[in-house]
Amino acid sequence: MHASVETKDNQTVFAQVEIEASTLYRLIREKKLILEELHCMNTHSKNIIRQALLDSLTR
C-alpha cells in the first residue's frame, strides 16, 4: 500500500527533512529506505545520497 498526502487539487505534498549521513547509510543497508521516493533539494544532498547508494552496492 502506498500512502501519500494529497491536496484537494490532487497534488502530492512533500515534506523537507534532514537526516544524518550515517543514518542514511544504515537505512539503505537495512533496506528500510526507498531511494526512488527521495527528491533532493540541492546538489550537495544529491551527492551524499548518490555516494551512500554506491557504497551500499559495493559492500
Image (spheres, rainbow, N blue to C red):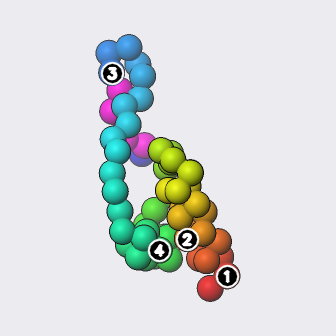
Q: Is residue 29 left or right of residue 3?
A: right
Q: Is residue 23 left or right of residue 43?
A: left
Q: Residue furthest top?
A: 9
Q: Earlier in the sequence, mark 1 or mark 3?
A: 3
- The residue that disc 1 covers is 58
Amino acid type indicated by mark 3: Thr
Amino acid type indicated by mark 4: Tyr
Does residue 33 appear in the picture of this structure?
Answer: yes
Q: CA distance from mark 2 to mark 1?
A: 10 Å
Q: CA distance from mark 1 to mark 3?
A: 40 Å
State if disc 2 and disc 3 touch (CB < 8 Å): no
User: Crowding near pointer 3: few (<14 within 10 Å), some, many (20+)?
Assistant: few
Amino acid type indicated by mark 1: Thr
- The residue that disc 4 covers is 25
State if disc 2 and disc 4 touch (CB < 8 Å): yes
Q: Quadrant of residue 7?
A: top left
- The residue that disc 3 covers is 7
User: Crowding near pointer 4: few (<14 within 10 Å), some, many (20+)?
Assistant: some
Magenta part of the chain: 2-6
The disc placed on residue 52 is: 2
Q: Quadrant of the N terminus?
A: top left
State if disc 3 and disc 1 touch (CB < 8 Å): no
Q: Is residue 17 above or below residue 52?
A: above
3 vs 2, front mark? 2
Q: Earlier in the sequence, mark 4 or mark 3?
A: 3
Task: Identify the residue at horizontal 32%, vertical 15% (top origin).
Answer: 8
Q: Earlier in the sequence, mark 4 or mark 1?
A: 4
